[in-house]
Amino acid sequence: MQVIPSIDVDRGRSRVVFWPGASSGVGAPTDRPEQIAVRFADLGARVVHVVDFDGARTGSPGNLEAVGAIASRIAVPIQLAGGLEGPEQIRLAFAAGATRVVLAMNVVDDPSLLADCLAVAGDWLAVGLDPRPERFAAFPWKRAAVPTLDAVVDELEARGVRRFVLSHGGSEPDGPLLSGLVNGHDAEFVVAGGATDLDGVRRLRDLGLTGIILGQALLSGAIDFSAALEAAA
């Protein structure tokens, strides 16, 4: 299972200051996304996830300069989320240096928009879903009844989606639900959040997930990245 570091970018800077030597007083803290990305790439990250907070607020990419700065410094794929609401925004993201994109749940009820986005991004497109029951049910569905998560994944797979990012925040993921998705679909499933320690990483690994995205847990030092890589192996 991949361990994917996440950098939340707001106005060009990381929302969480990264100081890998905080416990020993070594090194210096930084909120520069490109420096944080270089550190994780040097430690063995195979993908870096970037969340564009400005883009998420406005519906259009707002931190493409930061994406470009990261791309100029590392040779691993950059996965971008936030502000990607159509094919034009995806093109801008790719032009800046992103190599993968994550769309929000609103694309689920817009087959035409999804088709346009897939035409640009193909297999490098993922759809972000929040599988927590209360949040899934609260989504403003444009249909007569709330569908099941499994049914939505079926729909999206049939339309060509092969990657899914499941948001859990700090809550404990539903193991049986995730296991059912992994075993019941021919797609990649990555969990965003959902682990606060190495045991949590191991539990997700054992479910057969493709990867786990960790932001504050890694940047704050709550989970050591090298140890997380070992736990996920």
Image: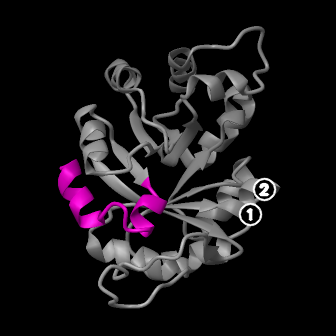
Q: How far apart, in angstroms, are the residues tagged by discs 2 and 1?
A: 5 Å
The residue drawn where x is 53% and y is 30% is: 160
Contact (Cβ within 8 Å) of mark 2 with mark 1: yes
Count residues near mark 1 (Cα–Cα under 10 Å), then give few for <14, some for 14-19, many for 20+.
some
The residue drawn where x is 27% and y is 33% is: 208
The residue drawn where x is 66% and y is 77% is: 12
Picture quadrant where residue 210 is located: top left
Secondary structure that dominates the magenta span: helix
**In the shown orientation, is residue 182 left or right of residue 155?**
left
Residue 27: horizontal and vertical position, in percent? 36, 91
Q: Which residue is mark 2?
A: 57
Q: Is residue 168 above or below residue 180?
A: below
Q: Amino acid at mark 1?
A: Asp
Q: Which residues are magenta?
A: 214-233
Element under disc 1: helix
Can residue 61 be seen by looking at this rendering? Answer: no
Picture quadrant where residue 111 is located: top right
Element under disc 2: helix
**In the shown orientation, is residue 86 left or right of residue 77?**
right
Q: Is residue 185 above or below residue 126?
A: above
On residue 54, the disc is: 1
On residue 31, the disc is: none
